Amino acid sequence: MARRQVRVVGAMLQNEQGRYLITQRPPTASLPLLWEFPGGRVEEGEEDAEALAREIQEEMGVEVDVLGQAMHTHHEYPNYDIDFRVFHCRLSRPTDEIQHLRVHDHRWVALEEMSAYRFPDADAKTLAKLLDLDN
């Protein structure tokens, strides 16, 4: 039987101080309370940028401009495979307040501080690539 393939998009949102937005998964979600780049699953028939904007609106109540793909990784979990694409984004209205609609918490974090947070494996791969690009 073929393994389930899940297409996921994430946002690399950076503020004026050069910090990146990460969000904490709810305690009732799979991989509870881990930190991740905001985003979510791409639904059938949806474009990546459209899915990313929708997910961020649903999770945090803010609108983003999706600027372009930053990186692509693949990760195999025990029961499914993740096709994970991360996009550079910016807040459409930087003054909008981030709400915790479907996230437990959020932080703006400098790259060198990211190791203090626990990420799911797929996000950890993305973070490793991001840190490598920064060096």
Image (tube, helix red, strand yellow):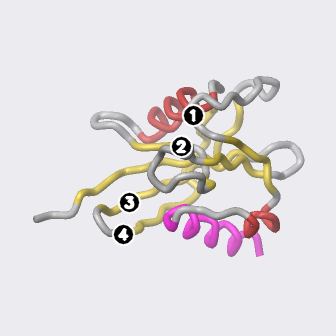
Pointer 4 local density, CA inside 10 Å: few below 14, some 14–19, many at least 20: few
Contact flag, marks 2 and 1 (Cβ < 8 Å): yes
Pointer 3 local density, CA inside 10 Å: few below 14, some 14–19, many at least 20: some
Indicate which disc, 3 or 4, sits on the residue closer to the N terminus: 4
Contact flag, marks 4 and 2 (Cβ < 8 Å): no
Q: CA distance from mark 3 to mark 4?
A: 6 Å
Q: Position of residue 54 (x, y in %)?
A: 50, 29
- Quadrant for the C terminus, please: bottom right
The residue where tag 1 is placed is 56
Q: Which mark is residue 76?
A: 4
The residue where tag 3 is placed is 82
Indicate which disc, 2 or 1, sits on the residue closer to the N terminus: 2
Q: CA distance from mark 1 to mark 4?
A: 24 Å
Indicate which disc, 1 or 4, sits on the residue closer to the N terminus: 1
Q: CA distance from mark 2 to mark 1?
A: 6 Å
Residue at x-position 65% and y-position 50%: 12
Q: For the magenta stretch, what is the residue range?
A: 121-135
* Residue 26 covered by magenta stretch: no
The residue where tag 2 is placed is 39
